[in-house]
Amino acid sequence: WGDGLIARRVNETAAAEQPAVVEPRTSGPQAVTPLAYDGSLRSRLDALRELVGFSRTRLDNRTLAEAGRVLDEAASRRRLSGRHTVVALAGATGSGKSQLFNALAGVTISETGVRRPTTSSPLACSWSDGAAGLIDRLGIPPRLRRRPAQNASADGQLNGLVLVDLPDHDSAAVQHREQVDRVLGLVDAVIWVVDPEKYADAVLHERYLRPMAGHAEIMFVVLNQTDRLPGEATDQVLDDLRRLLDEDGIALGEHGEPGAVVLALSALTGDGVGELREALGQFVTERGAAARRISADVDAAGWRLRPLYAASRRTGLSEEARDEFSARLADAIGATAAGEAAERAWLRNANRACGTPWLRLWRWYQDRGEPPTGRLSPRSQTDEEATARQRVEQAVRTVSDQASAGLPAPWAQAVREAAVRGAQGLPEALDDLAARAGLPPGRPPRPGWWPAAVLVQASMTILQVIGGLWLAGQIIGTMSPNLGVPVLLMVAGIIGGPLVEWGCRMAARGPARRYGQEAERRLREAAAGCGRARVLDPVAAELLRYREVREQYGRVMGVGTPAR
């Protein structure tokens, strides 16, 4: 107890002998070497900027706020000094970060004491000139800027370092915690100072360390106050701290691997401070912390946006889905029925052209005597139109569900909205197409053999007429009796006429079928073209837009295409 008190008094006396040096104000602007990002980071930032631009119409500003903040901070940091590295000292109440701050600076800058919280505002200490812009970015006024002791700045080990002492992250004062959160989002690296009593504090791990697991390469985790631990307790606590960091997902920089540096020291006695100063000096000399911080911020922003861009499965419309949609539209306008009607019309025209006159006369008489059939009543027409509209709506819903399956929610909604917009007026447009692309006006075209068939049928009729007149002449006595020839002529005409008609009907089946298929094909192509222009093309445009943003997201995450 006495030794500890004496040691604290000795340190306070030694610190008092070296007063803090206030950073002098410069009379003019200083020459600053801007920070330079490598090609990979520049490409990722450009991809993130394009990604945000593409997504403005699909995502709200609140969702894109973090990505926008990363872009703004990256642009702001790039304009400032690239020769300096801003490192924040963060810790809980009583962790001794202010003592460590003073030990690194070699002079009493930050107040230490029993009263909590001791540090109420961020303090900055710069080991070299040209860091004014970086400190201004942190919002630290000139009265809270200091320079290290002369011997600490003369050795050059920490040349380029800007060390910031933050208020306690678990302070009872809300404004202190807000300052900590604000500055932590702006610095290049962080030194987390923990003590043997609160190194496992849930607030530290859940609110800060775990969310910043991707920033392990710019993090130092320092176990302070090891002078309070007896014997081998320091190694045990340090191992447990490493275990907690591993559970937080923080990679540890051991065996030459990139990750967080974990050290144990005592800012009070100075044990281990030199090791931290050496590691910090090497870290600052590399001058890569700022770029690694921005890269980690891009990674964090990308992982937050992953549910909005990464599809759960393969997306898009297959050819089967497109063909099925076109078939549904064709069925809705009755393409099959229209083809069958065209085939019947062709056969009916063939029967009229090649049938016997007596049978045609009989059919004409029957058609005249019976009421017209085949016409739908107004009620049935209305029902048919309602059914067709329902089929069209069902086809649009089906294809929109197929196109949006597996897409993230915003893009799936965009695909469905595009399909709904295209479906407006689609039934009416299909009706117009059916009227224009249906059966052509007039009679169906006749094949080349029809005139010959008509001539043969006329010959059979003439034979019947001649045979009948001949028999009539014999009956009335104007001609000599001879029953064989006229009967033979009449029998030939009577039998030959139906045979010619039957033959023509058999021969007409093929052309009639092809004529009906052609009419059905025209209707199906017209329906497919209308559906493609109104529904499939807008849906495909939304899918293409999603593929573009997905490719940009893959560039943001540093891969060719994002994982599906």
Image (spheres, rainbow, N blue to C red):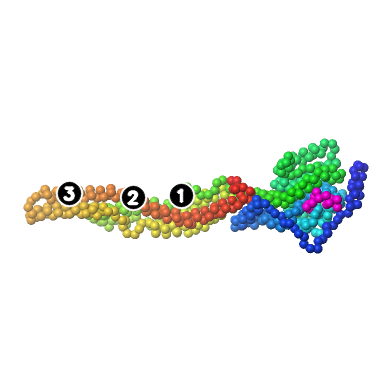
- Name which residue type carries label 3: Ala
The secondary element bearing badge 3 is classed as helix
**Which is more N-terminal, label 2 or label 3?**
3
Quadrant in the rendering for residue 63: bottom right
Please name the residue that numbered disc 3 is placed on: 492
- The span shown in magenta is 149-163
Q: Which residue is mark 2?
A: 513
Q: Which residue is drawn at the image coordinates 34% and 50% (left, top)?
A: 514
Report the mark closest to the observer, 3 or 2. Answer: 2
- Whether residue 484 is visible to the viewer of this picture, yes or no, is yes
157 drawn magenta? yes
> Could you tell me if the residues under marks 1 and 2 are in contact, i.e. CB atoms within 8 Å?
no
Which kind of residue does numbered mark 2 sit on? Arg
Percent across and percent down for residue 115 are 86, 51
Asked which secondary structure carries label 1, the reply is helix
Q: Position of residue 480 (x, y in %)?
A: 7, 52
Residue lying at 82% horizontally and 61% vertically, measured from the top left: 25
N-terminal-most mark, 1 or 2? 1
Name which residue type carries label 1: Asp
Image position of 270 (left or right of 210): right
Label 1, on which residue?
323
- Separation of disc 3 and disc 1 at Cα? 55 Å
